[in-house]
Amino acid sequence: MPKTSTSQDKFPGAQPTGNDSVRHCQWRGCADVGLHRAPQDQTLSDYYFFCLEHVRLYNAQWNYHEGLGPDDMEIEYRSAATWDRPTWKMGERQAPGRPWQNIFDPFDVYRDKSDAEGAPDAESAAVSAEVSTAQRALGLTGSPSLHELKARYKELVKRYHPDANGGSTAAEDRMKTINAAYQTLRSALTS
């Protein structure tokens, strides 16, 4: 980022920090305690310390993006759109061989099925038992859609929420069961 004029030039009231044991407001002529910090420039590494009144004055006039050209602003926009996190094109960071091998796959969607003989293994039987138990807990039959699941969940939450039942511990236990069943079915439907 290009560094333009310093805030010392623009805000002549700011004074360099002294070596006092109590940090005073760095605004010229102010004797209050400087509890609030304000950046000196765009590097955000050095700060002034002001009282509340003067930090408000300083911040109202300070512009982080002052002096940036259109190209620099475009870089700032793109960086802010991804919360300053690095990004890469899809497919660039795949594992060699099988690109899906590093994906968390609790239902073995990407499992190599060439060795399977058509019979369900113990894991898939446990998953289907877990799903059917969750369906019974929510009072659902068949294979409901995500919309139907959400509608049923909302209905049960309104009925069994502890706040709607005077803080009943039985209602609280029922809500825990409903929440666990909802999460199980939701993850089964969305995967």
Image (tube, helix red, strand yellow):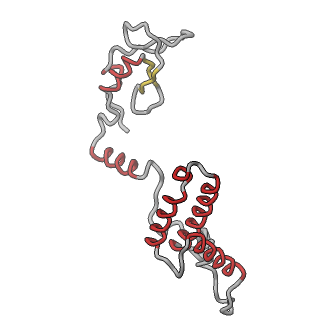
Tell me the residue at 30%/39% (across/down).
68
Spot occupied by residue 27 in the image (x, y as percentages of width and height): 38, 13
Which residue is most to the right? 122
Residue in the foreground of this view, choosing between 60 and 144 = 144
Taking depth in this image into account, of 7 and 48 the one nearest to the observer is: 48
**Residue 61, placed above or below residue 31:** below
Q: Where is residue 80 in the image (x, y as percent from the top left)?
A: 39, 47
| Quadrant assignment, res 179 | bottom right
Residue at x-position 48% and y-position 68%: 152
Q: Count the marks.
A: 0
Residue at the extreme left of the image, as rendered? 70
User: Which residue is outermost to the bottom?
Assistant: 117
Q: Residue at x 58, y 74 (%)?
A: 135
In the figure, 102 relative to 114: above or below?
A: above
Position in image of residue 177 (x %, y %) = 62, 63
Left or right of 6 on screen, residue 172? right
Q: Position of residue 66 (x, y in %)?
A: 30, 34
Which quadrant, please, contains the N terminus?
Answer: top left
The foreground one among 183 and 67 is 183
Q: Residue at x 58, y 63 (%)?
A: 178
